[in-house]
Image (spheres, rainbow, N blue to C red):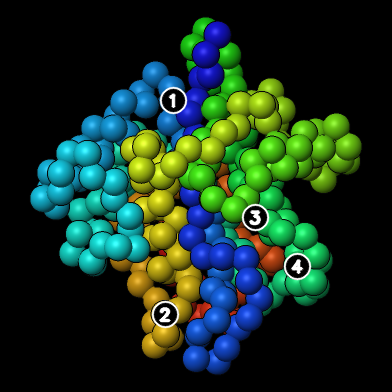
Amino acid sequence: MKASFRVYVDESGEEGFVFRDDFSGSSRWLILSAVVTRAEKDLAVVELMRTVRAQIGRGHKDALHFVKMGHAQRIPWVRQIGQAPLRTVSVLIHKPSIIEPEKFQSQRHLLYRYATRMLLERVSWLCRDHRKEGVGNGKAEIIFSNRGQMSYDDLRDYIHGLKTESDPMSVTIDWSVIDADMMRPVEHSQLAGLQVADAVASSLFAACNPNRYGDTEDKYLKLIAPTMYRHRGALLGYGLKLWPGDLQDLKSQNPHLAGFGEL
C-alpha cells in the first residue's frame, strides 16, 4: 500500500558559526521547512507551480529558485502557496544562541540532522492527526532537496538510531508515520514540491535573517502563514519551532521576530 502523505523538505541558510557585526560570514539562522500534502492530492502542487510559471512569464519546465528571483516575482509565488491545499512545518534555528556550538561542529551536518529530527517530530504529529481510514498506509514519504555533499545514508542511519536507541520521552516522532527507509533525496529541479519547499524555507529566512544592511522582509511570511500547521489553534511549537529557546527568549536579540507572535 502506498504512503498516505508526501513531504517535501528544503532548507535555507547554512551550518557555519562565523558571525560578523556587518552580517557577513555565516547566516545567523538555519531554516528547515517541510511541505506536507496528501499523496492523493499531490498533483495540486504541480498545478500550483504551473500557475506560478504562467503568472511570472517563465517556461513550463523552468525550475524556480527563490534566491534567484526578484521581489515582484516572489510575491505571486508565495501568494499561490498560501492559498494551496497543503500544510507547512518549519524549524528555525538561531545559531548564535546555541550555548555549545562546538558540539555541532564536531561532525559534519550534525546541526542539519538535529533540525531534521525536530521537523520530523512535527510532521509526524500532523500526519497522525489527519490520517483517513483506508487511504494509504498512514505513513509519509519524505523527499529531501538533494544537498550535494551530504550523505543521506548517514541521515537515514541517524533517524533509525533515534527509533532504536533514544529515550522515547525525549524523541517524540510518531513512528507509525515516519519510516527512515521511505526517505530519499531528489534534485530540486525534478519535483514541483521541492520548489515549493524552497520558497517556504526562503520566505522564513527572509523574515529571520538580516541582510547585509541589517534588514529583514516579512511579507512572504505573512502570505504563507495560512498553510502553517496549527494544533488546537497553537502555531508556535507546531508549524513553527524555534530553537534554542522560544520566541520570548529570542526576541531580545532579534526584535524583528515580534511579528511571529501575530501570525
Q: Is residue 136 above or below residue 100?
A: above
Give the image quarter of residue 138.
top right
> Is the C terminus in the top left, top right, bottom left or bottom right quadrant?
bottom left
**Would you name the residue on which mark 2 appears?**
211
Residue type pointed to by label 1: Arg
Q: Position of residue 201 (x, y in %)?
A: 45, 55
**Would you name the residue on which mark 1 appears?**
38
Look at the numbered discs 3 and 4 and tell me whether their residues touch, using CB distance below 8 Å.
no
Give the image quarter of residue 59.
top left
Q: Is residue 248 left or right of residue 190?
A: right
Q: Residue at x 37, y 26 (%)?
A: 42
**Would you name the residue on which mark 3 appears?**
112
Q: Residue at x 34, y 63 (%)?
A: 67
Q: Is residue 158 above or below residue 255?
A: above
Residue type pointed to by label 3: Tyr
Q: Is residue 131 left or right of residue 243?
A: left
* In-front residue for pair 84/2: 2
* In-front residue for pair 180/190: 190
**Would you name the residue on which mark 4 appears?**
105
Q: Secondary structure at mark 2?
A: loop
Question: Which numbered tag is attached to residue 27?
Answer: none
